[in-house]
Image: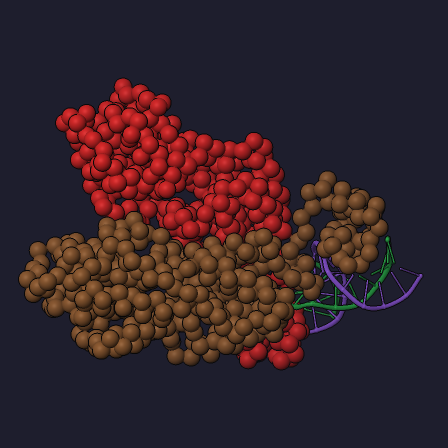
Chain colours: A brown, B red, C green, D purple
DNA sequence: CTGAAAGCGCTTACAG
DNA sequence: CTGAAAGCGCTTACAG
């Protein structure tokens, strides 16, 4: 600012006032001169200094599990959709589901004096972790930062989460009405809240149809495609009594499609496969995947809007959900008339 | 620091010295006391203040085209692989190929006083744009920031770029040796350097085999999957003389696979399809895609390493490349014996 | 409407 | 080895 002040022949206070469009009155001619000086010097204010002297940093922190995962980068895209016009720069941090790393990131975000934090990760059910993260986030709020959550977890901040339950119920209705009654289920990491919640929703929905899952047919594949290939292959060789496999995310469903192909099982004729999320890739597959659609980008947009509301101290609901629809594609069909005759290659 | 200083009963200067592991000597007992005080207070230094008072910000800016594009998020992952252990926080900005937006981001990154910038985007051949970006980046370097490039463009900074040419030559050899001699080519946006370079490499490789591309069979689909579906469909109805379509990126190749399926053309029996990049999705497709592999994550790692070298004022080469291999999967095969008999559904 | 001055939370010569 | 003090580039009461 000092250069600009000299160039325009005014004090640095005045420069700062026009820079910030401050409510403090500035003579229009003076303002003009300052603006011109800023343009000639291609002046770019030091964001650190601005942030330090009481102002906002116009900076946001977003904590996710994995930026290469379409689930998360679609959410980030949605956040971007509204953060960018609002003038915020976004810092995305991937914990890769490591609790220590996640905690460390939140701590550093505190040091960065971000105006706000969008917590999309979390749900890591590691003993003591939630409490530690909570302490850091509270410290951030005490320093004037706002925090919101975009995933189910045990933290007491305003949140928007996908309403997976309704979609899962629709999916189960769909499968049962096709005639399936013996299911396998592929779950995610045991310590992940998302996996636990989705599994519970499936179990409740099945129970409503008088179906109990056989514990032997409920197996974790860690939300991972490659592991799902192995898990389904191994399971099919051991016990092929099930006619549909429900996966708690799309990645694993993709793995099941691959495994079925290798096993010589036709999807959906011999086996129905379903996922959750509706990643962009699912409609490119053969067959396209029946899944529960989580509107990721929309979730991101709404989350950022919520953060904006909090930053501007508007009242916000403690929690809200975005609806998840059932998307029926071609990976589900009635079970084969005589499942016992299916054989593997 | 003032709280820590009080708690430990020392001056703030001393606190700062142990915080920074400064070369300035500190009595080991005093250091111990300070460390303990920091722990009890859960002290997190203000990064803005540190950055402002001459220190580094431990912050990096990465400019990409689109974070939801696997090409870019794999690169970001690679950057993360080495930036994180080195203690840098990464700010990823997506221009969505908008030159003004890209320029604005670079300008704001300047304001943030990032220690370094990794420019993965760019290559936007918009009149005057390169010069403006260059001016901003020069300003950043003048303020002590380091800049590196991870994509071909007209900017004079140390760079690492994929050596697409070699891979493309291998691909053309492969196709020609299968017996193809009439090709269609799907290109990207005309103003994108990446597209222009790849097209030139193909043309050179074809020429070496005495093949000239028919300009009517060279069409832009903007690097976009959905547009590739339309473009190939339209083209096939107009002129089905070609037996192989080479796409300048994988996204468009995926679109071609979809279009071929709808047109009733079997890939690879009726038509060979190839891409470039080797996105994670390509091996999940039906058929899996023959493509030129750009080692994206490796590119990110090497780029970040290069930046680290520059930050520590080591000598670095002005430019380097990462090799790109040909990955032959099942979307390419000899042309049909009598291409004229192929018909569309 | 304009300017001079204090202060944000650190780092780093400079004295001792 | 330790501390007091200047300074980083801004913002914002406070005077005028």
Name the residue: 45% across, 47% down. Answer: B66
In depth, the one of B342 and B276 nearer the eye is B342
Quarter containing the C terminus of chain A: bottom left
Q: Is the residue B160 above or below the residue A244 in the image? A: above
Seen from this angle, which residue lies furthest front?
A177
Rendered image quadrant of residue A64: bottom left
State the image coordinates of residue A98 (x, y, percent, origin top left). Answer: 39, 67
- Relative height, residue B343 to residue A228 (above, below): above
Q: Nearer the viewer, residue B157 or A235?
A: A235
Query: From this viewpoint, which residue is outermost toward the left?
Result: A341
Q: Count the numbered circles shown.
A: 0
Query: Is residue A120 at least partly visible in the picture?
Result: yes
On screen, residue A188 versus residue A303, left or right, reads left
Q: Is residue B118 visible?
A: no
- The percent position of residue B116, horizontal first and vertical second, equals 54, 50
Q: Position of residue A335 (x, y in %)?
A: 16, 63
Q: Tell me which corner region of the image, top left, top right, bottom left or bottom right, holds residue B57.
A: bottom right
Give the left or right position of residue A4, taking residue B158 as reference.
right
Query: Which residue is found at the position 51% from the left and 54% from the top?
Result: A80
Q: Give the residue drawn at x 22%, y 67%.
A: A177
């Amino acid at each position: 600012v000092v250069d600009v002040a000299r160039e325009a022949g005014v004090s640095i206070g005045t420069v700062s006032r026009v820079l910030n469009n401050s409510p403090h009155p500035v003579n229009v001619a003076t303002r003009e001169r300052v603006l011109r000086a800023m343009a000639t010097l291609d002046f770019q204010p030091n964001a650190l200094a601005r942030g330090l002297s009481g102002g906002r940093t116009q900076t946001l922190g977003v904590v996710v599990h994995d930026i290469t995962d379409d689930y998360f980068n679609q959410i980030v895209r949605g956040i971007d959709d509204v953060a960018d016009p609002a003038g915020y720069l976004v810092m995305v941090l991937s914990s890769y589901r490591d609790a220590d790393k996640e905690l460390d990131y939140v701590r550093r975000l505190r040091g960065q004096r971000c105006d706000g934090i969008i917590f999309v990760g979390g749900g890591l059910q590691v003993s003591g972790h939630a409490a530690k993260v909570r302490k850091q986030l509270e410290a951030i709020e005490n320093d004037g930062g706002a925090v919101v959550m975009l995933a189910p977890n045990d933290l007491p901040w305003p949140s928007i989460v996908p309403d997976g339950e309704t979609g899962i119920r629709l999916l189960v209705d769909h499968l049962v009405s096709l005639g399936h009654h013996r299911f396998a289920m592929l779950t995610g990491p045991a310590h992940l809240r998302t996996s636990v919640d989705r599994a519970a929703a499936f179990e409740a929905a099945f129970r409503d149809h008088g179906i109990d899952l056989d514990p032997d047919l409920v197996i974790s594949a860690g939300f991972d495609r490659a592991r799902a290939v192995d898990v389904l292959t191994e399971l099919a060789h051991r016990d092929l009594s099930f006619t549909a496999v429900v996966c708690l995310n799309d990645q694993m469903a993709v793995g099941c499609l691959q495994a079925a192909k290798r096993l010589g099982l036709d999807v959906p004729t011999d086996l129905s496969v379903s996922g959750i999320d509706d990643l962009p890739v699912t409609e490119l597959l053969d067959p396209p995947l029946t899944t529960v659609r989580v509107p990721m980008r929309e979730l991101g947009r709404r989350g950022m809007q919520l953060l904006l509301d909090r930053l501007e101290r508007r009242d916000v609901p403690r929690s809200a959900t975005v609806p998840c629809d059932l998307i029926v594609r071609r990976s589900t069909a009635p079970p084969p008339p005589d499942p016992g005759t299916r054989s593997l290659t």
